[in-house]
Amino acid sequence: MINLHAHTTFSDGLFPPERIVETAAKDGLTHIAVTDHFETSKVASLSTGDFEKYLSTIRGLRKKYEGTIEVLAGVEIDANPDRCDLDSLPFDLLNELDLVLFEYVNDKTNGGNGIEGLDRVLSNITVPRGLAHSDIKTSFADMKPAEVADSLSSRDLFVELNTALLYRRDGLTFYERAEDVIRDFGGRVKLSIGTDIHRRLAEVSNVQSAYYFVRRLDLIDDLLF
């Protein structure tokens, strides 16, 4: 049981990393990733100057909770170039992480870069990269399901199924709205599950609905972990 999207006091989250990890372990998760906002003006975010402290803190928790839960280090990067200087990202530091999330890719409403516009950035990141809380049905509306799968697969991008209430439209989660697209991902595009926790500890383990969705589509073997 994985949750690979959590924010802490290193950015705009309410709880310190250990409180998140402790809760995830208590709730029976097998993997938890701390993925604070990085170098964006959108919200309070982790800076390059605090990166080593951030990574050291998470690695310390990985060692402390070894055998109980796998603790992963990541960040969330804003694909809006007006809020994040994508060309100046410290790729050497990012490649020390376990994963990198990108939000608002192909999302014109939020000013996100098109997926092709991120190719240079993606080419410099060697760890797993994925789309966070993407409204695939809207952001890739001009592409057929197979074309979306081709685009993501060619860039080795995974897609996050996010259960947070914020990421719903017409009463459905973004991933439920994109079921026909995600069906075409099988064997080609990896999936992740995240809750985007900020202020409610109950959100740490709110992953069951996403697991039900993955099992129903017979995509459980396509999960990142």
Image (spheres, helix red, strand yellow):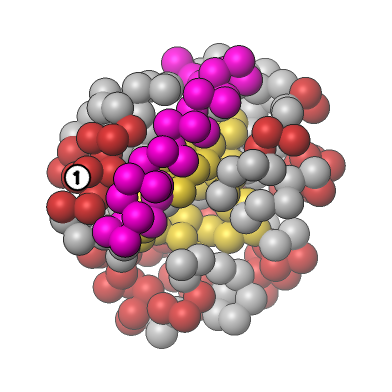
Instruction: Please tell me which residue lies in front, 78 or 183.
Output: 78
Image position, residue 144 (x, y; %): 65, 69
Q: Determine the residue positioned at 23% across, 35% down.
A: 19
Q: In this view, does 65 lie above or below 49?
A: below
Q: In this view, does 13 lie above or below 35?
A: above
Q: Is residue 141 above or below residue 133?
A: below
Q: Determine the residue positioned at 59% across, 81% down.
A: 187
Image position, residue 26 (x, y; %): 15, 52
Label 1 amino acid? Thr
In the rendered structure, the answer to whether residue 46 lies left or right of residue 85 reads: left
Q: Determine the residue positioned at 28% across, 43% down.
A: 21
Q: What stretch is highlighted in magenta?
A: 43-71
Look at the image and say whether residue 69 sits in the magenta stretch.
yes
Q: In which quarter of the image is the N terminus?
A: bottom left
Which of the 4 quarters of the picture holds residue 96?
top right
Instruction: Please tell me which residue lies in front, 143 or 87.
Output: 87
Q: Mark 1 points at which residue?
A: 23
Is residue 93 visible in the rendered image? The answer is yes
Instruction: Please tell me which residue lies in front, 17 or 12.
Output: 17
Image position, residue 10 (x, y; %): 42, 22
Q: Determine the residue positioned at 54% across, 18% down.
A: 50
In the rendered structure, the answer to whether residue 133 lies left or right of residue 38 reads: left
How many marks are shown on the rendered structure?
Answer: 1
Image position, residue 176 (x, y; %): 37, 63
Is residue 109 visible in the rendered image? The answer is no
* Badge 1 density bin: few <14, some 14–19, many ≥20, Cα 10 Å: some
In the rendered structure, the answer to whether residue 106 lies left or right of residue 58 reads: right
Look at the image and say whether residue 49 sits in the magenta stretch.
yes
Instruction: Please tell me which residue lies in front, 176 or 101.
Output: 101
Secondary structure of the residue carrying numbered label 1: helix
